[in-house]
Image (tube, rainbow, N blue to C red):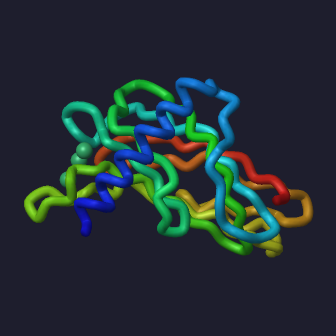
Amino acid sequence: MRATIRRLGTLLAVSVMGAGLLAGPAQAAPSGGAGRFKITIMSVQCLRTEDNSQDEAYLLINGERVWSNNSVDEPNSYAVNIDWKFDPNVWIQLWDDDGNHWYDHNDLLGQGRLVVSTGADPTPEDNTVFLNPNSMATSNSRFHFTQGSNYYLFFTVTLS
Ligand SMILES: [Ca+2]
Ligand SMILES: [Ca+2]
Ligand SMILES: [Ca+2]
């Protein structure tokens, strides 16, 4: 079962890549979620991989796998272009796939949270970004992940 799902995932990934080659950058971005707000993850920048060679990076939004790239190099940037609706919170994880063997689990490279906050000037925290729902201003426009690697994730937030 797991192998079948993985194969389906590979087929999907290959077909998406194929569509990308045919349609170019104008292809429809994957999207999901629900709520008043929308985060757009524009790109992933890798300054240092977790693996000695390339990383097999993938992104989870609220636990759903939304993007992956099996040949992430340092230093390099990769377009993501994922839209995800949310309200009031959304959390994002970046992982490196190592096949998830018992002797080599996949590696969590970092996680960030985006939190709607109407409080007065919440104190900035590492990788907790606050969204003022009145002004739509965010306390940051990127996450910085440094667990055994060095990655930036760039995003914008708009009304959905
Ligand atoms: Ca790894
Ligand atoms: Ca890996
Ligand atoms: Ca590992």
149 up-or-down from 25: above or below: below
Residue placed most toward the observer, 1 or 137: 1
Left or right side of 99 for 118: right
For the C terminus, give its image quadrant: bottom right
Q: Position of residue 108 (x, y in %)?
A: 34, 57
107 up-or-down from 132: above or below: above
Q: Residue at x 23, y 40 (%)?
A: 51
Number of numbered tags placed on the structure image:
0
Figure quadrant of residue 106: bottom left
Q: Position of residue 104 (x, y in %)?
A: 14, 56
| Name of the residue lying farthest toward the right | 134
Q: Position of residue 90 (x, y in %)?
A: 62, 67
Residue placed most toward the observer, 145 or 13: 13
Can residue 155 be seen here? The reply is yes
Left or right side of 43 for 138: right
Q: Residue at x 44, y 25 (%)?
A: 76
Left or right side of 54 for 30: right
Figure quadrant of residue 153: top right
For the N terminus, give its image quadrant: bottom left
Q: Residue at x 41, y 31 (%)?
A: 47
Left or right side of 130 for 95: left
Figure quadrant of residue 68: top left
